[in-house]
Amino acid sequence: MSKTVTHDIIIDTDPGQDDAIALLMALASPELNILGITAVAGNVPLELTQKNVRKICELAKKPETKVFAGADAPMKRQLVTAEHVHGATGLNGVELPDPEMPLQSQHAVDFIVEMLLSQPAGSVTLCTLGPLTNIALALEKAPQIAPRVKELVMMGGGLFEGGNITPSAEFNIYVDADAAKIVFDSGIPIVVMPLDVTHKALTTAKRLEGFGKLEAPIGPASIGWLEYFERFDEEKYGTDGGPLHDPNVIAYLLKPELYSGRHINVDIELNSELTFGMTVADYWHVTDKPKNAVWMTKVDADGFFDLVLERVARL
């Protein structure tokens, strides 16, 4: 039984195996009207992330999806990538053919601006799965888009879990902390899926069983990505399975009741050598700074994995 659309969304991403699962979930969900998918440099360089987005759309048999290439570097700094986690292609674990569907000629930043100005105010949700460069560039180009965004749901940051690229910084924020600062200062309503929540959603062997039973090509691709991606975090954290980060953004749109957190102030550290890129989350309200983000800390992990599997299985 199909549901009516509940969210018009733009997904900004840097695939990445966990991004790939998030995209499969979104492409399988009739509640989500994907206006476009914008690629950014992050886990791997832009040349690969824009190609990876199109590979995933074709795997999902959604070649009509509009895909745009955006920023190939952070706003002010050198690009830091994560091939040590995701492999040389960003999607190691499965080999997919080069995409046949076209890359749109419009730049991702121009697409984001145009879409937010042309759609009814408060109707478009931004879903960010990577560094925030494209969103910050759009805000710099057209500050008037900020009050038109319904909300921005993002994977990024960490407080209680520390960082995963430095002791204090999470990768998506660290890669372009200047962009993150612009986004958190923009006044857009923000929902954050930090490491504090994603580290509670682990790809245990039991949870992966269902993906292994899915038909080709979705089943082998999903399990290949999940098993490749988890190996790094299993070794690092000594856990059964690794955190499945980015699909939490899509899961929140589909079933927000899976999550809980609190409305707080989040600021981004830009000056310290030790804590550059840290999400300074005022979880205990020790300052009077305005609350600018809902910081999630709890997830129904079994419910989350049931939802991920149920959606990916639709493809």
Image: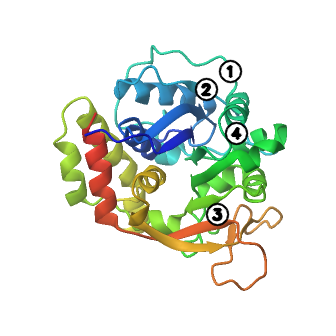
Q: Which SS class for mark 2?
A: strand
In the picture of the structure, the residue carrying the numbered disc 1 is: 106
As shown in the figure, which amino acid type bears the numbered disc 4?
Asn
3D distance between C-alphas at marks 2 and 4: 11 Å
Disc 1/disc 4 C-alpha distance (Å): 13 Å
Residue 292 x, y percent position in the rendering: 70, 66
Q: Earlier in the sequence, mark 3 or mark 4?
A: 4
- Colour scheme shown: rainbow
Q: CA distance from mark 1 to mark 2?
A: 7 Å
The x, y position of residue 231, in whole percent, is 36, 53
Foreground tag (1 vs 3): 1
What's the CA distance linking mark 1 and mark 3?
32 Å
Name the quadrant containing residue 156.
bottom right
Q: Nearer the viewer, residue 306 or 220?
A: 306
Q: Label 3 sits on what residue type?
A: Ala
Residue at the extreme left of the image, as rendered: 213
Return the disc, 3 or 2, that comes first in the chain's sequence.
2
| Residue tagged 3 | 169
Residue drawn at 27 percent across, 48 percent down:
309
Residue where numbered disc 2 is placed: 68
Residue located beneath label 4 in the image: 134
Q: Quadrant of the C terminus?
A: top left
Lower position in the chain sequence, tag 2 or tag 4: 2
> Residue 90, position in %: x, y?
49, 37
Whether 279 is drawn above or below 310: the answer is below
Left or right, residue 161 beside residue 314: right
Q: In the picture shown, does residue 180 fall above or below 99?
A: below
Give the SS element for disc 1: loop
Which residue is located at x 80 percent, y 61 percent?
270
